[in-house]
Amino acid sequence: MASNDYRNSMTGKLVRRALLDSVRKLNPVRMMSNPVLFVVEGAAVLTLLILVFPAAFHASGRQGYTTSVFLILLFTILFANFAEALAEGRGQAQADFLRKSQTGTKAKRLRKDGSVQLVPSSELRRKDLILIEKGDLVPGDGEIVAGAAVIDESAVTGESTPVLKRAHGDSSSVTGGTLVVSDRITVRITADPGESFLDRMIQLVEGAKRQKSPNEVALNSLLIVFTIIFLIVVVTLAPIAGYVGVTIETSTLIALLVCLIPTTIGGLLSAIGIAGMSRVMRFNVLAMSGKAVETAGDIGTVILDKTGTITYGNRRAYRFIPAPGATERELVAAAVAASLHDETPEGRSVLDYAKSIPFEWNEADYAGGAVVPFSAENRMSGLLLEDASYYKGAAQEIKAHVLRSGGDYPALADAIGEDIAKEGGTPLAVCRDNRLLGFIYLKDTIKPGLKEKLDELRQMGIKTIMCTGDNRLTAETIAREVGVDECIAECKPEEKIRVVLAEQAQGKMVAMTGDGTNDAPALAQADVGIAMNSGTTAAKEAANMVNLDSDPAKLIQVIFTGKQLLVTRGALTAFSLANDFSKYFAILPAALAGFMPQMDALNVMRLHSPESAVLSALIFNALIIPALIPVAIRGVRFAPMSADKLLQRNLLIYGVGGIFIPFLGIKAVDMALRLFD
Ligand SMILES: Nc1ncnc2c1ncn2[C@@H]1O[C@H](COP(=O)(O)OP(=O)(O)OP(=O)(O)O)[C@@H](O)[C@H]1O
Ligand SMILES: [K+]
Ligand SMILES: [Mg+2]
């Protein structure tokens, strides 16, 4: 998706496909989903009937005029269909691209006895265990249960740097279509065929599963109300005119109706929604619903997880600092014991560090113990042997453990932990039984460019909160470095939800972005949940968007696109309604001139004949749709500012523009028509 070539090569094909689709969409059953255009289609059919059976409608027999009205109406519908088809086609092109990464791979499924069976990837089911080795394509979405591997995800993300994925950490999920470039992993499949998140995305961008967002449904209802009102107005106009002894041509009434009903926004509405979704996808963000994209436009608070979201999350042991009275060897030995069975990146990095010192150990010395795996709840991990227990973990937890067991936790130890934290590192305290031995300094790297992006969020009036399981001092240091407004530390998973709820209780729309299993509940509770692609399956399933580049700055682009979607829809609605108002001035004087000469005062455009006035207005009404397709699909451009200001400004520009442009446009068409007279 990151590459541009497929887009360019697609353009011609895209337009051709959209042209064909515009004709297919004439099918009245499909047209019913768009009430405004359905009325235009009804009007076109009626005009055709007048043309064929003029006597039945007491038509004056000006066939050329009626034919013109019919043709213009037909093109009005075709133009609107084309807008929608073009937006859908762009999604389809993206879907085709995604599909390419999914085709027909073979998978090495593991039988119960551990033997390997070669099966087509389409046969893989949720919970199947498979083996993936160097050079293999990952046959489906899954979670690594054993091993670690370097994976090239460029086929899906466009990102060319391979990433390290491993079991048990926050980077344990793999995506179908990516390539394992080193080592071997055992993976548990997490999606049945056709249900992977790429599959779901493909269905969404193709429009097959597109659900209209509540905003779009509301606007659609409003358009229906307008249409019905004008339908009543126009239908009652005929008998009123008849009462004063004037007959208005039925085809003129039809033209009046079509000019008055909101055809512009009616024709562009669904294209705006579809295009918004595919625009988000161009930033390598998979949105699971159009509603999520729109909601993003209204976000008031953004909550970011620290480890794995703001930082790369590959925390490595960087230094060992013994506590008073302990030696470095004692500390390292205990840290190694507490990490032998710890599969998290932190645990593995402890062993790597020990090897580099070098420190040697004999696995047999630690055999037969009980493993205490790391959990976000307990914030420690360890190994319980018959003669000793070893723990490492968050300083507060180890301190509590040591004191509980009757040990001593000197003030100097607190100071060591705090020093590490103030530098932005994560201190892991290490103890053997009730004796504190010292600290492991875990170091992580902040993803580049984040500070500027968070500044942009502030300019848009959005509050940022960092929410982390890590300790307060580390959190505050990182928070200061990236410049978030608030920072909440030592958060357990349920506390992350509470932060989301507290913001929502203030009436704000909340976006949450995270990578870990400890973020999953909060991702699900947030109005917009964006999971890092590097994260766990739990996080990705809870979220309603997945960021393929694992770049939290993408949040800005998603919010921007959401705003753009809302502003574009608002602006084009204002434009459309203002437009219709101006068309009164063209058509009413023409239609009524026969029996109300005063109406001529309204004829400010000085159009050369009533007939030309009606046709000019109708032609303008049709042409404005394709003229606005680029705005609908690309979105209105704007600089970062708060949502209210944006909307006000654009409503003003497009509303006022919408009043004046028809005068110029209709006059121009009228002058052009005169050339053919
Ligand atoms: N493998 C491990 N063994 C022992 N303790 C650990 C281990 N990994 C992390 N910890 C400690 O547990 C704390 C909480 O971890 P948790 O995964 O909940 O949050 P986090 O990864 O620090 O932050 P975030 O919520 O921002 O992703 C860590 O800050 C660290 O002190
Ligand atoms: K109209
Ligand atoms: Mg995390």
Image (spheres, rainbow, N blue to C red):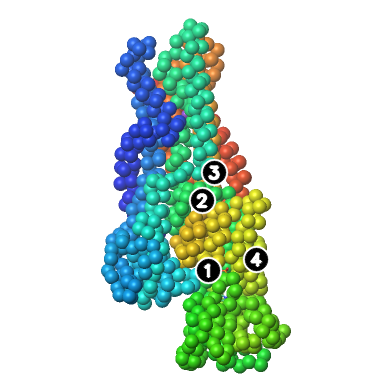
| Structural crowding at the residue carrying mark 3, measured as other residues with C-alpha within 10 Å and reported as few (<14), some (14–19) or many (≥20) | many
| Structural crowding at the residue carrying mark 1, measured as other residues with C-alpha within 10 Å and reported as few (<14), some (14–19) or many (≥20) | many
In terms of secondary structure, where does tag 2 sit?
Answer: helix
The residue positioned farthest toward the right in the image shown: 411
- Looking at numbered disc 2 in the image, what kind of residue is underneath it? Ala
| Structural crowding at the residue carrying mark 4, measured as other residues with C-alpha within 10 Å and reported as few (<14), some (14–19) or many (≥20) | many
- Looking at numbered disc 3 in the image, what kind of residue is underneath it? Val
Marked residue nearer the N-terminal end (4 or 2): 2
Marked residue nearer the N-terminal end (2 or 3): 2
Which residue is painted at 51% across and 11% down in the image? 240
Is residue 556 something one can see in this rendering? no
In terms of secondary structure, where does tag 1 sit?
Answer: helix
**Which corner quadrant of the image does residue 450 belong to?**
bottom right
Task: Give me the C-alpha separation between circle 4 and circle 1.
Answer: 16 Å
Q: Which residue is mark 4?
A: 488
- Please state the horizontal and vertical placement of residue 661, each as a whole percent of the image: 50, 31
Marked residue nearer the N-terminal end (2 or 1): 2
Q: Which residue is mark 3?
A: 567
Task: Give me the C-alpha separation between circle 2 and circle 3.
Answer: 16 Å
Task: Give me the C-alpha separation between circle 4 and circle 3.
Answer: 33 Å
Do tag 2 and tag 1 residues touch (Cβ < 8 Å)?
Answer: no
Marked residue nearer the N-terminal end (1 or 3): 1
Which residue is painted at 62% across and 45% down in the image? 645
The answer to whether residue 527 is above or below residue 154 is above
In terms of secondary structure, where does tag 3 sit?
Answer: helix
Mark 2 or mark 3: which is in front?
A: 2
- Please state the horizontal and vertical placement of residue 566, each as a whole percent of the image: 53, 44
- Please state the horizontal and vertical placement of residue 307, each as a whole percent of the image: 55, 70
